Image (tube, rainbow, N blue to C red):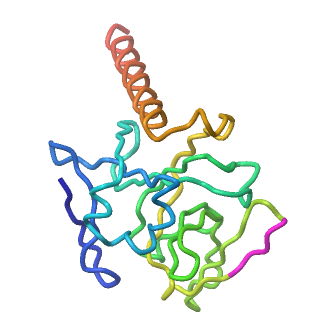
């Protein structure tokens, strides 16, 4: 099933996936799909074909997982990691000096540290943690989506032939299951005490 979030001025509809209970799931933008994200991000059929996962420990909100390419955010995020972001409805909700996945008309998907010092002038400043890359500004009219960093799945230490989307999704599901079991055990201990 797919559904939509009404996000106001920028786009009338924002396609999302939900599970059989109508709950949000996390769409996973695979390495292969990331090249087409700029043209498919608003297409409900494109979104409906994304793999999905669920991480019950994430707070409420709409989340999506994005693959990271390159070393611009090294050492915190490495090439091959998967970053999960929460959808931000408006650029004025962006917090200064925090990390975001930004979809722009010209650059497609980028993961950067964002500065809001020029927000009143209509610009966000995007900066890499790797100082070999210079910061640059993007006009708000070029920004199509903003996703606030929530979680980094560090999978860059694996060899390329060890990775496939199914094994990554299984790993993420098992992390969610283990965390839920840990939470249940803590709740039982708290009830006893």
Above or below — where is 144 with respect to 78? below
Where is residue 41? Give x, y as percent: 38, 69
The majority secondary structure of the magenta stretch comes to loop
Where is residue 67? Give x, y as percent: 55, 53
Total labels drawn: 0
Where is residue 76? Give x, y as percent: 71, 48
Above or below — where is 18 with respect to 157? below
Question: Taking 164 as reference, is 181 left or right?
Answer: left
Q: Give residue 61's quadrant in the image.
A: bottom left
Q: Residue at x 45, y 73 (%)?
A: 38
Question: Taking 31 as reference, is 184 left or right?
Answer: left
Front residue of 143/171: it is: 171
Q: Residue at x 58, y 76 (%)?
A: 107
Question: Taking 28 as reference, is 106 left or right?
Answer: right
Above or below — where is 49 with respect to 126? above
Q: Is residue 83 magenta?
A: no
Find the residue positioned furthest to the right.
132
Q: Residue at x 53, y 55 (%)?
A: 149
Q: Residue at x 61, y 61 (%)?
A: 98
Front residue of 138/117: it is: 138
Find the residue positioned furthest to the top.
192
Find the residue positioned furthest to the bottom.
121
Quadrant where the C terminus is found in the figure: top left
Find the residue positioned furthest to the left.
21
Q: Give residue 153's quadrant in the image.
A: top right
| Magenta region, residue range | 132-136
Front residue of 13/68: it is: 68
């Amino acid at each position: 099933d797919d559904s939509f979030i009404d996000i106001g001025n920028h786009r009338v509809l924002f396609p999302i996936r939900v599970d059989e209970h109508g709950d949000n799931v996390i769409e996973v933008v695979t390495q292969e799909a990331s090249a087409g994200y700029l043209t498919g991000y608003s297409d409900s059929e494109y979104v409906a074909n994304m793999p999905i996962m669920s991480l019950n420990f994430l707070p409420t909100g709409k989340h999506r997982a994005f693959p990271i390419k390159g070393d611009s955010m090294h050492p915190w995020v490495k090439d091959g990691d998967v970053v999960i972001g929460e959808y931000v409805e408006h650029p004025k909700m962006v917090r200064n000096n925090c990390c975001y996945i930004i979809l722009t008309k010209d650059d497609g998907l980028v993961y950067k540290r964002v500065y809001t010092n020029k927000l009143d002038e209509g610009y966000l400043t995007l900066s890499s943690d790797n100082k070999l890359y210079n910061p640059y500004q993007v006009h708000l009219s070029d920004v199509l989506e903003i996703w606030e960093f929530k979680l980094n799945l560090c999978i860059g230490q694996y060899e390329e032939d060890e990775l496939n989307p199914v094994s990554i999704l299984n790993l993420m599901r098992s992390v969610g299951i283990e965390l839920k079991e840990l939470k249940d055990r803590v709740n039982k201990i708290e009830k006893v005490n």
